[in-house]
Image (tube, rainbow, N blue to C red):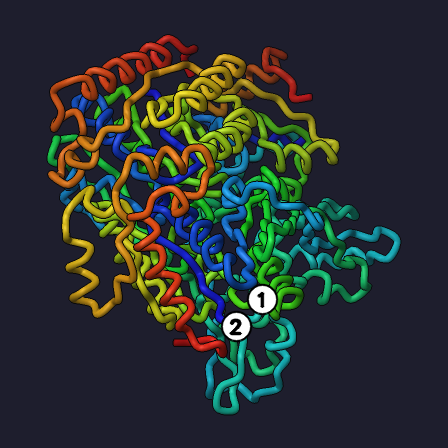
Amino acid sequence: MPDIVIASGKGGTGKTTVSTNLATLLAERASVVLVDLDVEEPNSGLFIKGATEKFREVRNKMIPEWKADACTGCGICQKVCSFHAIVKLGKDIMIFPELCHSCFACSELCPADALPMQPIRMGETTLSQLGSLTFVESRLDIGQEQAVPLIAQTKAMVAHELRDTRYRIYDAPPGTSCPVIEASKNADVVILVTEPTPFGLNDLGLAVDTMRKLGKPIAVVINRSGIGNDAVEDYCHTEGIAVLAKLPNDRRAAELYSRGECIYTELPAFRTELEKIAAFVRSLPQGGRP
Amino acid sequence: MKEIVVISGKGGTGKTSITASFSALAAGDLVAADCDVDAADMHLLLKPDMALAEDFYSGETAVIDPDACIACGRCYEACHFGAIHSAEGFYAVDPLSCEGCGYCARTCPTEAITNHPGKAGVWYSSTTRLAFTMIHAALGIGSENSGKLVAHVKKQARAAALAQGKPYVLVDGSPGIGCPVVSSLSGADYVVLVTEPTVSGVHDLKRVYELVKKFNIPAGCIINKADINTAIAATIRDFLELEHIDQLGELPYDENVTRAMVAGLTIVEHDTGALRETLQDAWKRVRLHVDSSTQK
Amino acid sequence: MKIAFTAKGTDWKAEIDPRFGRTDYIVIYDDVSKVLSSIDNRSVEDVAHGAGPQTAQKLFDLGPDVLITGNGPGGNAATVLQKTQLKIFLGAGGLSVEAAYDAYKKGTLATFA
């Protein structure tokens, strides 16, 4: 069952538009799970209307908790923390949860077992169902700074619980840094969504470099085709990257999107292009990589 | 000297295009900083000369010396990030997964593991084609975007503005709500929020505004593509009023914005009509609010 | 008594650094031995997160009774310092270490709650 990641270098190119429309189209005929991994600003759910929430789970990160009675005051914990999350004030140990990266070094190197790791909340995951479309969303709490652990836990949950779904589509965060790496590293194929403008081209180049470093097969979808110039298409041609579809530039698409509505059911020209992406996905070997 | 930071929560709302336009309008009075280091685009409009380029280091990556490695596997067991794997009888670190915690190095009985400062990217000090200084950067692929590079870019921009006697530092901020945004907001005197009247735009605007409130920074908002959904535009105005966020202006959905970008120009250089006027008014309002706020 | 200052330099004429976590130097004056010493905190620039706790740890290890600074410690640093017996005074930003010390003795600096 292929794992398809929808990503882009630049934000706002249409990642969520493509992932939600594609998932809905595929779900007309098969079981699909759409996973929103943009945990800082998850908004695919706004486009999946009428889904029934099946469960909501708090997601935790592991943080050390100081047991004063067991502590010998050796100070090893403070010395081994690379993130300045532990301060030793005489006999007292203070821990800063938001600085902790959950490396477990202090806990496991403590000679007195005085720092057991405990779960503390960082966000939550919800799962909803609409026909044969399962929608999973993870949301980082405001003030939490690390997206990667939540993305990793969400992927693990999907791999475990939703193994038998025919298609798994992941809406990745924008950019090329750690959260995108985490979201994409187990993908069978990465579809990069771009727009045919100078910003789109610039950020597509960054995204292509990133995915190549991860060794991922890449395909491109050009959104708002017609709005700019041919540079993106020329780039793909030169780089030997398949352009799966060119979604047409249409103000009506922007209006439908603004209302959180499905686009392909209303705009036939959009549907024609979206079907090309669906055909590509359907052609992927069931084992995974193309 | 006042620092103005432009953010959006959601990507693609027009943050960079609008920041570049402001910079063109105020060219003699500012130093610009592109803090969207993960996918920087402002340079495409401002053509900085990259006169000074410096490597930037952040975080560490563990490296295992295969000659010293006895393949005991203690590092593999210690690593909670799955960054260590065995290869040809020895263990090796995957730099893209290494969190730089240093735990593995502490467990190695033969001291085969060392921590190396990671090159996270490059930062530049440039003069743009509009003759003002711009500080910008490029984050390396898969680098941690902790906000440290953002902090560095801002620090350099502030120093340049002070040295040149410029009254403003104008910052193109990062999308999202994580570390780089927090870093973009730190020390700001005024925040410009750029949004669009879509369900996603409103959702992300409210989330990022929670962060702005925590920092207690006065803010204003520009609604871009305002006419694609008048109902949502109205709810945004209500939200702005409720939260006492200045209403700086509204731009219509206009393909001239893209035409300007394709031509390599800011909107205000390319357009001579309503778009330009709206942006001029918005910038005037920003300056009014910023200049009248209490001195630092 | 030991009095600590956040400073941009290492002598009496140095300007007080208004920041705590990212202060360039911590200057300590021992009013018994009359010795002025300092530690260099500038490596904090390399720290992405946790500057506050790191500097608070360094300060604590120097054993001061009083801290004189500008804007005051941020969230995390404040959490650490509030657990100590340290008396913290604010508002010295822009003054020289010497002038800040005088202001402290005259009681014209604000206290940090």
Considering every residue shown, the one lying at the far bottom of the view is: B89
* Chain for numbered disc 2: A
Quickly name the residue at label 1: A165
Q: Secondary structure at mark 2?
A: loop
Residue B163 position within the rendered picture, expressed as x and y whole percent measured from the top left: 24, 28
Residue A266 vs residue B179: left or right?
Answer: left
Considering every residue shown, the one lying at the far right of the view is: A69
* Chain for numbered disc 1: A
Q: Residues within 10 Å of mark 2 (few under 14, many from 20)?
A: some
Residue A153 position within the rendered picture, expressed as x and y whole percent measured from the top left: 62, 59
Residue B86 vs residue A214: left or right?
Answer: right
Q: Is the same chain shared between marks 1 and 2?
A: yes
Residue A135 vs residue A64: left or right?
Answer: left
Earlier sequence position, callout 1 versus callout 2: 2
Q: Does C3 sit above or below residue C101?
A: below
Residue placed most toward the observer, C41 or A110: A110
Marks 1 and 2 in Cβ contact (< 8 Å): yes
Residue placed most toward the observer, A287 or B263: A287
Q: Residues within 10 Å of mark 1 (few under 14, many from 20)?
A: some
Q: Secondary structure at mark 1?
A: loop
Q: Look at the image and tell me in which quarter the C terminus of chain A lies.
A: bottom left
Residue B2 position within the rendered picture, expressed as x and y whole percent measured from the top left: 34, 21
Quickly name the residue at label 2: A1
Residue placed most toward the observer, A260 or C20: A260
Q: Can see residue C56? A: yes
Residue at 56% x, 41% y: name it: A49
Q: Quadrant of residue C82?
A: top right
Q: Can see residue B51? A: no
Of the residues shown, which amino acid type is indicated by label 2?
Answer: Met
Q: Quadrant of residue C62?
A: top right
Q: Does A127 sit above or below residue B283?
A: below
Of the residues shown, which amino acid type is indicated by label 1?
Answer: Thr
